[in-house]
Every structure is written in C-alpha cells, then in structure tokens.
Amino acid sequence: MNRFKDRTHKRSLLYGLVLASWTVFWLAGSSPLRAQPKDFIIIGPGGGRQLPLAVGAFRDMGTTPSDTPLGLKITQVITDDLRATGLFRILDPVTFLEDPLSSGIVPEQIDFRSWSAIGAEALIKGGFRIQGDRLEVEARLFEVIRSGMTAKYVGRPEDFRRIAHSFANEVIRHFTGEPGAFDTQIAYVSRRRGSKEIFLMDYDGYAPRQFTRNRSINLKPAWSPDGRKLAYTSYREGRPSVFVADVRKGGIRRLPLQADMATGAVWSPDGSLMAVALSRRGNTDLYLLNAQGKLLRRLTSHFAIDVDPAWSPDGKTLAFTSNRSGSPQIYLVEVSGKNFRRITFEGRYNTSPVWSPKGDLIVFNGITKGEFKLFSIRPDGTRLRRLTSLKGGQSDPSWSPDGRFLVFTLERGGKSVYLLNVATGWLRRLGRGESPAWSPWMKNS
Amino acid sequence: MRMSGVRGRIPFLMVAGLAVFLVGCPKKAPIPVKPAEPAKPAEAPDPRPAVPKPPPAPIPAPEVKVEDEDAKKAREFQQAMRQFESELIHFDFDRSEIKDRYKPVLNRKAFFLKNHPNVRIQIEGHCDERGSVQYNLALGDRRANSAKAYLVALGISADRISTISFGEERPLDSGRNEEAWAKNRRDRFVIVGQ
C-alpha cells in the first residue's frame, strides 16, 4: 500500500470562516490568534474539552458521486477510532445541514458555514474510487482555527479498514503531535475443545485469525519490539516451553533452556534482551536471555515464586510478581539484578504488572472482595488507583503502544477481551478470548 | 386343486385345530420360564428363595492352581494401580505444603511404589483459576515437587518420579466458587511406565 500526503494551506478559502470565528472569540474574550501550526492543541481529558468533530460520509467519486456501503464502512472505522480516544465530541450525522447531493470534498464544494452552524470545529470529508482491484481514497481534515490536511491512499478494496485506520492515525497526529495506534494488532488466546490456541486480531476486534495450530495448550503471547516475532509458552512438545515464531513467515523454534519449565518470555524494549521464568527443582525464578534466546544470567535467586516479568520503557527496570513476602505482590528490580523493592502493600494478591509506554504507571490486577480488578500505581509505589468499576474478574492487562488504551481479560461466565481508554474509562468488548498482548507500532509494509 | 373360499381352507383349518389341540391341551406342570431355575415338579413351593445349583467342582490339578494365583496377582495389581491413580491430594489456596490429612494418601502411594519397584510415575500439579497464568504454572510446579519430595523422603528413588505443572489449565470443576476451586487445587498421580 502506498501513501503520500499533501499538507495544503487553505487559509484563503477558510478566511471567511476564520474571520467569523475570530469575531466570536474576540467577543468571548479569548484570542483566536493561537499557536503556530507546530504547537499542538491539547484537547480532551486532562487538557481541556473535547473538540467537536463532524465526519461526513465518504463518497464514491465515480462517474456519479453516491453513498455506498463501502463509503459508510470507511466512515464508520474512522469515526470509531477517533471516538475511542475520547478527544473528540463526534457530532451526530442527523444534525448535518449540508446537502449531500451538491457538496463535495474540496473546499470549493463545501459550505463551511453549515458545519460551524452545528458547532463543528473540525470536519473530515473524503471520497474514494474503485477500479477493479484498486481502491483509491482521498481524505481531508478541515479545521476552523488552523490549516487542515489531506491524505491520499491506494490499496485493494479489502484493505479499506487499514486505510481508514491510517487516516485516523494521522488525524490524531495532527491534533496531538503523536500518531494514533489504530493499525496495530492484538495477539490473544482462544479456547478450542480441550486446547488453547493463539490468535491475532485488529486493535478494534476485527479480522481475527488463528496463529498457532498445534492443538495443545498455548499461553502468554508476547511481541518482539519490531512486531516481527511472537514468543509464547506452549505444551506442544510436552512440558511448558517457550517458542518464538515469525509472524509473517511462520517459522517456529523452541528456546532450548535447561529447566523443567520455561514460561512467559518477554523482549526488552530495544530487543536486545529477553526475560523469562524458569522452573528448576520446584523453584521458579527470573532469568535474562540475549536476543537469540541464549541464557545470560539469573535475575532473581529466591526460594519464592518469581514470575510475570515486565520491562520499563527505558529497559532499565523490570517489574515482576513475587510471593517472597508470603503472598503474591509486585516488585521492581534493576536489570543489573540490584535494588529489589516491593511496590504493592495493599491487598493479599497482586500479579501481572505491565509498564505504561511513557513509564509513568504500572498497571496490574489485584484481588478485591474475592475477584481480580485492574489497578494502576506509580513506579514509586504511590497513587494506587482502581481503573474500572466493572463487574467481573479483570486480568492480564496490556498497553497500546501510544499509552492511550489497555486491553485485558474480563471474566463474566466466559472470558472476553475488553478495550479500555485509561483516561476516560470508555470500554469496548472486542470478542471472546483471554490473555491479550498489544503489538508494538506497526512498520509500514 | 384350487383353494379358495372357506371350503378350500377346511383341510388347513383341521390341521391348525389339531395343532392347537396338541399344544394347548396338556395339563402338565408349567414349563419353567427361566432356564437357570431348576424345574419344580408339583410339590409345595419352597418358601426360601431359589438357590442356584452349585457349579461343578473343579478338577484338581497343580497347573490350574498357579494360573489362578497369577491372574489374582494381576487383578490385584490392576486394582492397586487404579487406586493409586484415583487418589488425589489437595492444597490450600496459594499453598504447596502437604496437609496432614493427605499424608496417609501419600504413605499409601509410597507403599505401592515400594512393592512395585518397576513402576514410574508422573505427578501433575494443578491450581484453581485465580492468579496469573504464569504464577499458577509456578505454583502447580511447586505442588508437584512438594509431593515428590515427600515420596523421596520415604525412600522412593527420585528418578522414578517426574513432575509437570498444568497451572490453572486443566480444572476438574469449572465452577466459580470455593467448592470448585478447592477441587482444582490438587496433585494427580499418573503411572507412566512399569
């Protein structure tokens, strides 16, 4: 899929609109002459209010511009992505005033007054063309205050979701300075009769596909930082061992480790190390491996159970679960093996730590009133907070690479994978499954 | 000769009637329904329940006697193996120590293993579903090794015992209550070779 962008300044065409809004702002007492295009407006939770955004239906620009199911689907994907971030107040299409038959996607064909009249401060419009096996999409973002942007995509018709996610990523980058993560993937575990296999799906739950097919028990998928490999724990050769598989090419190899059991391997953020739990003679400890899976050194050396290794984003510290104090709690240790410290002191049972991509929070699950719930805590052990008031057991959290979302397992009868916006509490069920692992940023193919 | 109408059927009817007469008329003692029961001729019915006839006495011969004992031993061994495998031991939440009430179970297993020195076993450690997947794999591993250590301390050679953990992956009871969880926190003993 090729992609090329065209950042176009449309100041002259929006001049009338800007002037109008300038007057409004002047009357309201605030200055419309805001930040230069390079400064980004902080919108949304924690930084201000939500930006009112209208997403017009993407239209088939063939010989007769028309509304088609594909256009509505593209619009829906973009709308769902942007809504999930909590940064926008998505305006209801029912309120749109513009005449769909006479309007288009270039400024000359858009009546901006009809959009600002309903309160829109940003507007997305787009069109597409299908010629045989070729889908072209042109998407535009118009803004009241600053210049918008245009993006054009080419792909196959069945890739429309990928294209829509890419544009949504760019919309987020436009407003916040950092791209969205809507084209990333989630690996997870799904039960089959008597076995558990690893599956992959889009971040929004679409396109589930089976990844392992060995009819045994497969657990704890973990992504390499370049998104090319998946490590997982499997009984496929008898006792639990760690396997590393190439996501695209499908090759698999077992990490040959001298242990009764090897579980839960995770790569360091720069990909140079792996941490893994090895069980020898009834004792489970954490060990460090090099990138090829060769044993480097022992990290914990305690008769307690030490499991669930999780790397800090700078690769210098690991969080893990240990019951060395008598019950499972969250601990930190430097990668050098020094400075063990416990950070959870409330609750009898805390496991499964995961570090936020920005390094400011550790999320874990802890038993409260007999059930697992999700909590966050600062790495210094302060600011313990419960993340949701959801009913049902919540476990196995995993962060999106942009730090905006968590996925986790929710148990209510069966087990499902849920998506949570950490700042707003917004939730979405992705489908049946458990033990999700969010991929890193996907490089363009 | 054409047989038609009632007239043509008279010879048939006569034969049929004779057959009925022969079969239906005799007033003997009722034919016994159950072949196993001995025939009871016309004497007063025995108030006691019918006693089956004893089987014919076996022909005494030394070879037949030895075969019986071997078969008996084999049967006993099968029975002991079944008991060995069917008896589980259970654990408290988040613990791997052998509880006092299960020590007799392990003692019995040690006894069996001592009497059958060729038997090799695998101990499976299991957990209830609470806790992280990886933590439960480690805890199951501990539980299996805990039972192994106990048997080894009783004199069973360690290389006869292998261990494996299934963590929370193979529950006996998928219920989400204390009762089900208690059932799932267990070690299971499987004979893997003789």
Image: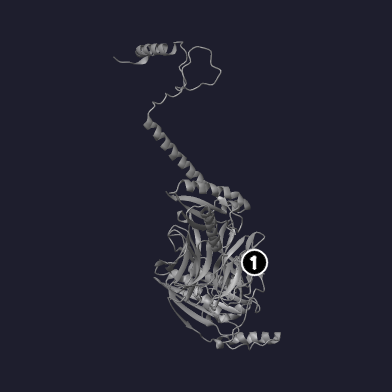
- When asked about the image quadrant of residue A114, the answer is bottom right
Q: Nearer the viewer, residue A190 or B122?
A: B122
Q: Quadrant of the C terminus of chain A?
A: bottom left
Q: Name, please, the residue furthest toward the left.
A: B1
- When asked about the image quadrant of residue B22, the answer is top left
At a point 45% along the width and 46% down the height, the residue shown is B116
Q: Nearer the viewer, residue A61 or A420?
A: A420
Compared to A64, does A409 lie above or below?
above
Which residue is under mark 1? A388
Residue A404, given in percent of the width and then of the height, sits at 58, 74
Residue A60, given in percent of the width and then of the height, sits at 47, 72
Q: Quadrant of the N terminus of chain A?
A: bottom left
How many numbered marks appear?
Answer: 1
Residue A402, given in percent of the width and then of the height, sits at 55, 76
At a point 35% along the width and 11% down the height, the residue shown is B11
Q: Nearer the viewer, residue A83 or A149?
A: A83
The chain ID associated with circle 1 is: A
Compared to A181, does B56 lie above or below?
above
Residue A392 seen in the figure: yes
The type of residue carrying mark 1 is Thr
Left or right placement of residue B163 versus residue A420 in this view? left
Residue A203 seen in the figure: no
Give the colouring mode of the picture: one colour
Left or right placement of residue A110 versus residue B69 in this view? right
